[in-house]
Image (spheres, rainbow, N blue to C red):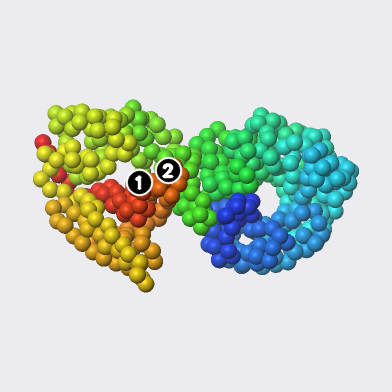
Amino acid sequence: MSEKLWIFDTTLRDGEQVPGCQLNTREKIVVAKALEELGVDVIEAGFPISSPGDFNSVVEISKAVSNPIICALSRAVEKDIDVAAEALKYAKKGRIHTGIGVSPFHIQYKLRSTPDEIIERAVRAVKYAKRYVEDVEFYAEDAGRAEKDFLARILEQVIKAGATVVNIPDTTGYCLPEQYGAIIRHLKENVSNIDKAIIATHCHNDLGMATANTISGVQNGARQVEVTINGIGERAGNTSMEEVVMAIKCHHDIPIHTNIVTPKIYETSRLISKLMNMPVQPNKAIVGRNAFAHSSGIHQDGVLKHRENYEIIDPKDVGVHESSIVLTARSGRAALKHHLDALGVVLEGEALNEVYEEFLVLADSKRDITPKDLLSLVGKYVDESTFIELEKVSYESNGSIKASVTLKVGDKTEQASSSGNGPVDAVLKSIEKIVKPDIELEEFLIQAITAGSDDVAKVHMRIMQGKIPYYGFSSNTDIVVASAQAFVDALNKIPVKNKVTVA
């Protein structure tokens, strides 16, 4: 029978330690509610003694959510525990997470103590926390580099003192999967009262092993995983929640289940990315922009024929509408036809072959193939088009910021002006006046390609029409122009309603 794996999310505590990713209390409540909807079991809401803001956030999150356990971090210090307990006074289900370093490095150099003194302090902290809450978690910091027999000794004592969860952090991301799994297995076999507590994993990603180590820990008996959305966290980050959950879901031979509502993974990922102003790397597993994108002709043909040829996860299972078929010089006829169909141009037989040969020549010399390029290739097969072309952009700041654009939509030339909070906002509003799209701009990223004041800016946009994303790209020395071009590029990828059939 499948056992439950408890999902302990520390996005709001360990994840928020990333420089520049701090959230205010209102934003933390938004995240906490999203995590509740996602189905996490435990939310580590903060480290109350670290700042008044963190204390207040734990208080307000405790009021705002009902289902998850709300956890507050503390050191093995009575004052820390007092403050954590005070912050949790409104929690429907509260947990104090206290602990101390257990590796030779921490005992000798950080704490300047001895193993026996560390055990004494750990036991005293757990007993003290137990006065406030029944649910006490003990973290053995830097357990990944601790001596196994000492780790077993201290855990046996803290469980005896009342710990309900024992956390085995690979704090520095040092372990390999086999090593970390062996630590969990050793504890299962050598801590006499281990059945009275849940073993938790907490792995960092310094060597890129966080997810693998966590899964190894689960396979060897851990039943709680401490994770963050998008894998954010100290240094190289923490274990990614989405990776662990989907790895377990894909591997049915692991007799474990979670309460995560997986179709909400993608939207939760985007929420965290937006609020923390921390873009998700394109090749990030599960939630990256390219996680379900295919550019190789062999892969594209296989996916279009049967998704499972090249995808072990259905994009819809994580909240992504569909796979992306990206046109490159390596794309085949199936991918080209797929994109032409979306533009309302249906080519078959010799006509498709002729356009495909011309497409390959173009793709060899051009990095990004746009809808405009495709319509140019099939121009003799199409009488008219709803294609949008940006002809002119101008903007000025004279007390207020105004912009105007000229667009060619099909055969018509249209012009519109608008004011905005900035030149980019004004230009995009001007475009929307003409096109009137039923969309929402969800992601807007600007990157410098080289360096210097004369640099070229590369703009990436993601717009949403309902739940369907469309991506736009452009580059220009003028950020405003690049933004307008990327916006138009994304709009052009929305399929036309009336498709044109060419015999």
Q: Are marks 1 and 2 in contact (CB under 8 Å)?
A: yes
Q: Which mark is residue 112?
A: none
Q: Quadrant of residue 329?
A: top left
Q: Amino acid at mark 2?
A: Ile
Residue at x 62% of width, y 35% of height:
207
Vertical position of residue 464 compared to residue 382: above or below: below
Q: Which residue is mark 2?
A: 449
Q: Which residue is mark 1?
A: 475
Could you tell me if residue 356 is visible in this image?
A: no
**How many marks can you see?**
2
Residue at x 32% of width, y 53% of height:
481
**Residue at mark 1 to residue at mark 2: CA–CA distance:** 9 Å
Q: Nearer the viewer, residue 287 or 375?
A: 375
The disc, 1 or 2, on the residue closer to the chain's N-terminal end is 2
Query: Farthest front residue?
Result: 453
Q: Secondary structure at mark 2?
A: loop
Position of residue 241 in the picture relative to residue 322 (left or right): right
Residue 75: percent from left, percent from top: 77, 54
Q: Amino acid at mark 1?
A: Ser
